[in-house]
Image (cartoon, rainbow, N blue to C red):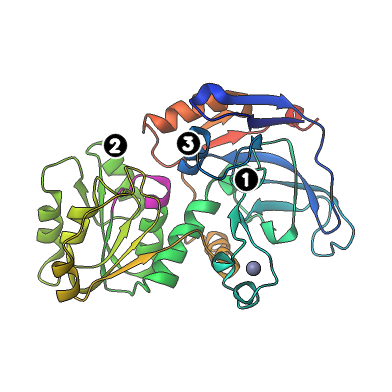
Amino acid sequence: MQAVRIHSHGGPDVLRIEQLPPPPIAAGQVLVAMKAAALNHLDLWIRGGMPGVALPLIMGSDGAGIVREVGSGVTTLAPGDEVVVQPGLFCGRCAACLDGRENLCPDFGILGEDADGVQAGLVALAPANLFPKPTGLSFEEAASFGLVFLTAYQMLVKRAALQAGETILVVGGSSGVGAAAIQIASDLGARVIATAAAGDKTEFARAMGAHEVVDHYADNWHKRVLEIAGADKVQVVFEHVGAATWDQAVRTMGLGARLVFCGGTTGALVEMDLRHTFRKHLSFLGSTLGDLDTFRAVLQRFEEGRYRPFVDRLFPLEDVAQAHHYLEDRRQRGKVVLSIPESDIN
Ligand code: ZN
């Protein structure tokens, strides 16, 4: 089978398309023939060099495919089942896992970072990483949303407890996780202000459900957000951009507001004036990926048509380096997906 694998860190040239033997199926595992796999910003970080990532590594956290074979002891899946990948890894035995808070497991990890990922013709996974593909979605669409919707739903619903009628600021609304946040917030009945670059990225954020979009390359864009938000300012901020936007995002927060964050794509070090935060009773909530209950909730909403996938561009698996360039140049509006032809499986 073909797989996207790295043996060293660096630019897109370290991505290799390799012919590998099919992975062995351990007891309790399922062999899946992958049809599509998506890219995330995480792929760029891992390729560029992340501490603790063991090499060589097959890339990729998101995908969809068809069950080919099940290992001993697997009763919940059968050959022919169409599945979507849940990217979180966890032990299933600790107190957090038994309590349904799998993303707080001490052994928590992510496919394509802490274990071989899914940008390959065949992958062997535990049933906890495989869920039924929403009907009505293509494999490419089903591959596209897992990580970003899991992350954004966990942040908005489980961490920030966003309520209908609240005003939310989604920073970086044209990225994958930003667009997921806009859809989730809008579906919840919140009033959504997003930031995006002017032009087609603004149009994309609107199409995702943002009620107002502010150009985040304009000077002092937070003042425009405050004008739109009105006297109570913003109640929830969704942040994943980090250093470039943090200060202005914090300035939009009203009394008792919550800022929920992940990522930090422009840098992880930020400065804050603590006097402004405690006097306004602000909350800052970190979050990583999500639990299984959240993944089920996201799939259910795709099944109901309340959320919709946003595939920007498809690349064949062997053009993965071009796909990385495309993402790195910030040209995407939504998700970049790799299609995996039948010939890559054998
Ligand atoms: Zn655990």
**Which is nearer the eye, 97 or 329?**
97
**Which is nearer the eye, 214 or 239?**
239
Label 3 vs label 2: CA separation? 23 Å
Label 1 vs label 2: CA separation? 27 Å
Disc 1 secondary structure class? strand
Indicate the quadrant of ligand 1 in the picture.
bottom right
Disc 3 secondary structure class? helix
Q: Is residue 237 above or below residue 246?
A: below
Reply yes or no: does residue 175 show up in magenta.
yes
Identify the residue at the far top of this view. Answer: 13
Reading the image, the residue beneath label 3 is 44
Q: Choose the circle earlier in sequence order: 1 or 3.
A: 3
Identify the residue shown where x is 21% and y is 56%: 249
**In the figure, is residue 165 to the left or right of 287?**
left
Reading the image, the residue beneath label 1 is 63
Identify the residue shown where x is 56% and y is 66%: 291
Measured as percent of width and height from the top left, residue 308 is found at 48, 53
